[in-house]
Amino acid sequence: MINFPENRRMGKVSITPDNWKTDGKSLLKKKWVIRYRYYDDNKEISCKRRCF
């Protein structure tokens, strides 16, 4: 869990492809997915984010 100011938090970040840190330029041609969950305790909401 990553904590931000004013009672906001973000859960674990998941990145696909799994080998994004080690592979070379060939990864730029693959589909990327970044997932995380954001919590705002002030508004009592949580959201899932999915980016491409």
Image (cartoon, grey):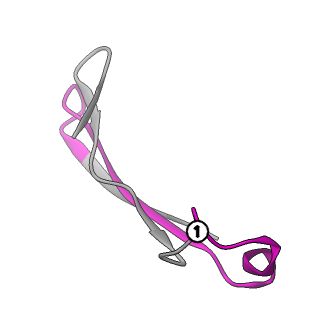
Per the image, label 1 sits on a secondary structure element best described as loop
Residue 16 picture location, percent across and down:
51, 75
Q: Mark 1 is on which residue type? A: Trp
**Seen from this angle, which residue lies furthest top?**
6
Front residue (pair 46, 9) = 9
Q: At 18% across and 38% down in the image, what residue appears?
A: 44
The question of residue 21 being in magenta is answered with yes
Quarter of the view holding residue 22: bottom right
Give the position of the C terminus as an image quadrant. Answer: bottom right
Count of numbered tags: 1
Residue 17 picture location, percent across and down:
54, 78
Rendered position, 14 above or below 10: below
Which stretch did the figure color magenta?
Answer: 20-45
Give the position of the N terminus as an image quadrant. Answer: top left
The question of residue 24 being in magenta is answered with yes
Tag 1 residue = 20
Residue 49 picture location, percent across and down:
45, 60
